[in-house]
Structures are given as C-alpha cells and as structure tokens.
Image: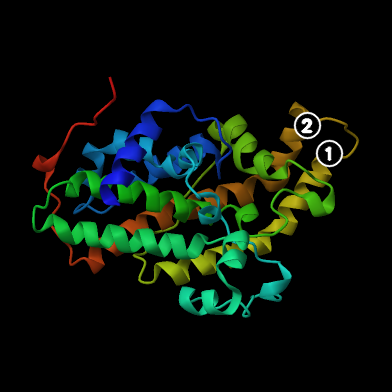
Amino acid sequence: MRRTLLAIAAFVTLALAPSTASAWGFEAHRFITRRAIDLLPSALKPFFEQRREEIVLRVVDPDLWRNVGWPEDPHHFLDFGVKEYGVYPFAELPRDYGAALEKFGRATLERNGLLPWRTAEMFGDLRRTFEALRRQSPYTVSDTILYSAVMSHYVQDAYQPFHATDDYDGVQTGQRGIHSRFERDLFERFQSRLAVNPPPPRPVTSARESSFDTLLTSYQLVPAVLKADKDALVGRDAYDDQYFERFLANVGPLLERRLGEAISATVGFIVGAWEQAGNPVLRLQDVRPLERPR
C-alpha cells in the first residue's frame, strides 16, 4: 500500500492540473504550509526547509487523488448538523471510530465524513515514518515528506467552517457557492491584504481529539460567515468586486484567524508526531531528488 500511495501521489501531483475544488483552494493550502515550515522548531526546520518545494507541492495531493478514482471525498469533511449526530456538541457521534462504526455503519459514516479519523490515521503514519528514520529504512525520507504533506492537508481542512457542517454550500439558506467564495475566492483576491498572525504552536498529543475540537469550533463559525455573505450582497445582484470588498470587511478577521490557527496546527501536528516518535534526528544528507515523469 505504501508503494502504491507513493507512486500514485507522485503521478497525480506532477501530471494533473489543479482542476478540482479543494478546501481553502490550492493557493491557501500552500500558503498555510509555507508559513508552517517557517515556524518549525530548530530540530525539524532544516530538514523541512531543504524539502520545502516538495512538501508545498504535495500538500494538495489529497484533492488531486479524486481524479484517479480513489474514494477520497469523505476524508475532507465531517457533517455536523445531520440528524443522526444530534445537536451541538454532537455527543451522539462517538469519537472512537470503532464505536462510531458499530453504532452507525460504514455507509452513514462515509456519507457524513471521516475527517478527524483520517487525520488521526495520517498522524499515526507520520509518527511511524519518523520512527523508521532511526533505522535508515528505504524510502523513509520520501515517506516523511509525503505523510507530512498529506496529514497537513487534512489538518488544514478542519479549519474551514464549511467542512464541518451538513450545509456545506449554503443550500439551506439560499447562498449557493458560499463554500468556494469563502475558502478560495476571498483568499486569492485579497491574500496580500490579509494580516495572518499564527498563535504559538503547541505539539498535538491526540490527533483525533484535536481534529474534533477544531471541527466543533468551525461549525460554530458557519452562521457568521453566512451572515457576512448575505450582508455583502445587499443591493447587488452579482458577486462582483464590490461584493467581495464588503465580504472581506465583514469576515476578514475570521478568515485571518482561521488561517493563522491552521498554520499553528500544521506545526503542532508535525511536531507532535515527531515527539511521539521519540525525537529522531532528521539528517540533511538523506535528501532524495524529486522524481518527475519524462
């Protein structure tokens, strides 16, 4: 499975154009990841800095995997608000995957999203890869970069409010398209004007619980984004420049805060996996060139 993942990831990342919709958009995912690398501690930063190009490239891999037929979509969201999970804080949904599977069945879980469990799975894969660095196992360097990037993508998805709600595109309120207007269009239009200040990163100890907590916060932010969108459209019949200026004025601080928190969380997850692996030394001489198809 590991070799299959590496092979397909390499092909998809380098051969396919970014044509699918993605959480935060490709540019925002890469922005978050670049900023996260800047904040890594000294024991980790040189290793990731030397491989910056590849990890920034691969952070959008999970969105591209849809193009090769993988059942990838459920890994990117968790639909709080569905009747099966009750009301906030959705205690009807067990946090343990085995218990949730026994209670609801695979079909229901996949329909409503698997993001926190997928994040925890990738956290575990990264931890094991860090552990393998001590043994100088084949592929450990490329594995470390791949799993760091893939895990980071899912970590970042949880900070987008519309990845935490069953009303993921404003259908229930007649605001179709809000998903991409908030996560992609707003960022790409106004990136140079955003003041993104990440809080101090903290190593993650429980990937699953951290992801659930983040998604609960994201869910609570949905009404504010919907209101900002509605207010920005007052007196207009198109999502034009004036709409986006109003939208930014209404929701810009929230966007800046979530981006900053996503940057810190990306650092916290990478550092947490490394610490749980026993703080292995990351050797710079283990660099392998990025292979591109001819």
Q: Pick whichever, 52 or 138, lies toward us.
A: 138
The span from disc 2 to disc 1 (Cα, nearest Å) is 7 Å
Reply above or below: 114 against 244. below
Query: In this view of the protein, can residue 198 be seen by the observer?
Result: no
Residue at left offset 91%, top offset 35%: 235
Where residue 211 appears, x then y in whole percent?
48, 65
According to the picture, the residue beneath numbered tag 1 turns out to be 233
Residue for point 50% across, 49% down: 72
Residue at x 39% of width, y 71% of height: 206
When the figure is inspected, residue 261 is found, relative to residue 84, above or below; the finding is: above
233 left or right of 219? right
Type of residue at label 2? Answer: Tyr
Q: Nearer the viewer, residue 248 or 79?
A: 79
Tell me if mark 1 has few (under 14), some (14-19) or many (20+) residues whose alpha carbon lies within 10 angstroms of its own: some
The number of callouts visible is 2
For disc 2, the marked residue is 239
Could you say whether the residue bearing mark 1 is in a helix, strand or loop? loop
Q: Earlier in the sequence, mark 2 or mark 1?
A: 1
Q: Secondary structure at mark 2?
A: loop
Name the residue type under label 1.
Leu
Q: Are marks 2 and 1 in contact (CB under 8 Å)?
A: yes
Q: Quadrant of residue 59?
A: top left
In the picture, measured across the screen, residue 233 lies left or right of residue 30, that is right
The percent coordinates of residue 265 (x first, y second) are 42, 57
Name the residue at 49% across, 55% down: 261
Foreground: 127 or 278? 127
Q: Is residue 223 above or below residue 228?
A: below
Q: Which quadrant of the rendered structure holds the C terminus?
A: top left
x%, y% of residue 50?
21, 37
